Amino acid sequence: MTPRKRLMGVGAAVLAGSLVLSACGGGGEDPAEGDSEAIITVGSGEPQNPLIPAMTNEVFGGLVVRNIFAGLVYYDENGAVQNEIAESIESEDNVTWTITIEDGWTFTDGTPVTAESFVKAWDWSAQLDNATNLSYFYEPFVGFSFEENTSLIDEGGLEVVSDTEFTATLKQPESDFPVRLGYAAFFPLPEAFYEDPEAFGENPVSNGPYTLTEWEHDSAITVEPNPDYAGDRVPQNGGVEFVAYTDEDSAYNDLLANNLDIVTNVPASAFSTFEEELGDRAVNQPAAVTQVINVPEYVEDFQGEAGVLRRKAISMAIDREGITSTVYDGARTPASDFTNPVINGWSDDIPGSEVLEYNPEEAAALWQEAEEMDPLGDDYTLFIASNADSDHQSWIDPACNTIREALEIECEFDQYPVFDEFLEARDAREIKGLFRGGWQADYPAMSNFLGPIYGTGAGSNDMDYSSEEFDAKMAEGNAAETPEEATELYKEAQEILFQDMPGIPLWYYNVTAGYAETVDNVAFGWDSDPILTEVTKSE
Amino acid sequence: MLWYIGRRLLQVIPVFLGATLLIYGMVFLRPGDPVAALGGERGLPEAVQDQIREQFHLNDPFFVQYLYFLKGIFTFDLGPDFSGRPVAETIANAFPVTFQLALMALAIETIFGIGFGLIAGMRKGKFFDSTVLVWTLLLIAVPTFVLGFVAQIVFGVQLGWFPVTAGRDPDFESLLMPAMVLAGTSMAYILRLTRTSVAENLTADHVRTARAKGLSRSQVTNRHVLRNSLIPVVTFIGADLGNLMAGSIVTEGIFNINGVGGTLFESIIRGENVTVVAIATILVLVYIAANLLVDLLYAVLDPRIRYA
């Protein structure tokens, strides 16, 4: 199995939560009274980074870190933001935020969690010299720099007011700032961390629902309930064992044999059978991941007015419905916007979104129109680039087939053997056609699917797309007073994207997971992670 | 004899240097940038990437990097990998279980391969022989991963005779099914080699002479037929030990055994060059040792072979 390198995130997922609930309630029986001593086993993998919150940018380490640490806020089963250590997070102008925290929280080594625990941790993680994987999360803070080593405290981005209060100052208004604070980058760290970060990464001192008991490399990580935990996510079981699997198929087979309680990823080979095999213990709900084909602005074929017509023609030539049902057996949902259905305020009828519907006649007409303006010729070959070390051929080939049929051009999968080779070409702007893109939300806000990808000069804007109109709309949304108002503005920003088509949204990923007969109360959050504290074991 | 062993051991030095240089070169030439991939789709900030490259000497020319690697080997300190974990620890974790698995597979394929091969060879053309030939053909034709999955689902999930996966701290019982799957193809080859060799030797002059002398059937079989027939088989088994250790990626993956195969695969994907080269080097040394052992065994099996 290729190690999954998707980035994780946090956020609001009302839709996801309701689906999970129906999955659990399907049996119509009362959840069995659990054994509070029982250890829950979860199929996972060896974390790629030390267990330091700001270092964990991949799923395996992220799942552990989120269960052993507590932040200012957390995301509940329905994906809503709930205060955990925070008492209040307030701002008048969306720029300067005053954060007060509850008294009485401690780390597992007995030291108290104070305002300084947060401020120092964020400052350390944001410093360039410490090269943390999540450093981009601190980019909005005053004083943050990717060029030189700076301290957010010295530059005025963070300030401790008292033991229970601190302020954060941002470079510009960010209305969704409180939503971000449940992310691992914003967890507090104890004093012990700074003495020896390396040892800490192996055996962290934490403040969350669980605390680490053992990390046996390449085979398992065990955590047990933290008796000093002072929040709402109180574990209903005797601990969790994250079992490392190198192959999803073997984890799934272990689940079938009741040797494993929860799998977070059903292997593709079982997509067509798992719902039958697991019955109401199968989980298939939207995840906060959206797959896109990106259009590089530097490729001449897609520039200008003719270019935009071609983008729309290609979009309408792809049979999303067909591919998601035949290739993925329903484990993907055709996209109807640039964001994701797990996000609050999501809607599928944004003006312009009709270009995402399969319409070969219209597609052919648009392509013809573009040909009249700026001919590419009949023997034109469209390239769709991706890495070949994970399974992308299975959707690119059928997508190419429908494009070939509708537009009467050639279409080919432009393969890069390994992921980092693909990244290198992407970052060097050397891709000769369209390329695969995917986005997993970091926090549950619509803006997270838009700004970081389509904003001018944004970190993940690998297309070099630039639209003043779009940037202005996003800035307006970020400065909005209420979340509802912001959502409306973000939707208007999407209308601009539908005109320009810097990317062609394909489909939303689903969480395809399952659990064994041995456990109850298993729900998956908006971020595709099981909510482990709630799980009970009936044995 | 000792002189011979000494000479062979001296040969290890150039082979070791050549192999590490070659493997390091190949890994180095692999396109792509592992540091860029550390941040997933989003990628890490350029400044952070630069810092990591600096830390791992990735900006230095090829030979400087290679010398750093050699220094690491000879000072027994290969340094950390990208995740900050010592490379030596990763390797030390991976080898014991793979070694155990390989030895178990080796024992299974040797015992059953030679045993059935001998019987089949003695009864060439009879019912037992034909049946065994069909079975070995099947074993050779079916890829290991198919065999592994079928065994896992039938014997593990459905019948529950064996543990589905080996899990942490695998014991003899949980490694039994993986070892049998791993041994499958090689056992078929050993069986066929032994069978052909035995059948051939049965008609050899010295065997006829031995029979004419009035030796008992078992004495003829054990001392004159089997021993002589084993030379090609031993050659195969010797080479196979290396194969079993390096080639168990598929089996280890299916049965979730945290051994060399999985570690090597993950390291290649993650661009952990030092880990890849170190593991490959150890495997080269295992091959060399196994080959030396085979060469020495020749002398035991066939008194006409002498080393000086």
Image (cartoon, coloured by chain):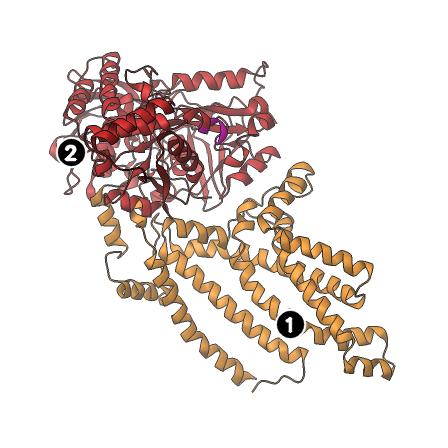
Chain colours: A red, B orange
Residue topped by disc 1:
B232
Task: Give the chain of mark 2.
Answer: A
The three-letter amino acid code for the residue at tag 2 is Ile
Quadrant placement of the C terminus of chain A: top right
Q: Which residue is mark 2?
A: A153
The residue shown at (62%, 48%) is: B147
Q: Position of residue A488 (x, y in %)?
A: 25, 14
Q: Secondary structure at mark 1?
A: helix
The residue lying toward the viewer, choosing from B10 and A452, is A452
Identify whether A429 is placed above or below B23.
above
Which mark lies nearer to you, 1 or 2?
Answer: 1
Q: CA distance from mark 1 to mark 2?
A: 73 Å
Q: Which portion, as a residue range, is magenta? A: A323-328
Which quarter of the figure has residue A57? top left
- Identify which residue is drawn at 61% across, 67% down: B236
Residue A102 rendering spot, x and y as whole percentages: 29, 21
Q: Residue at x 49, y 24 (%)?
A: A284
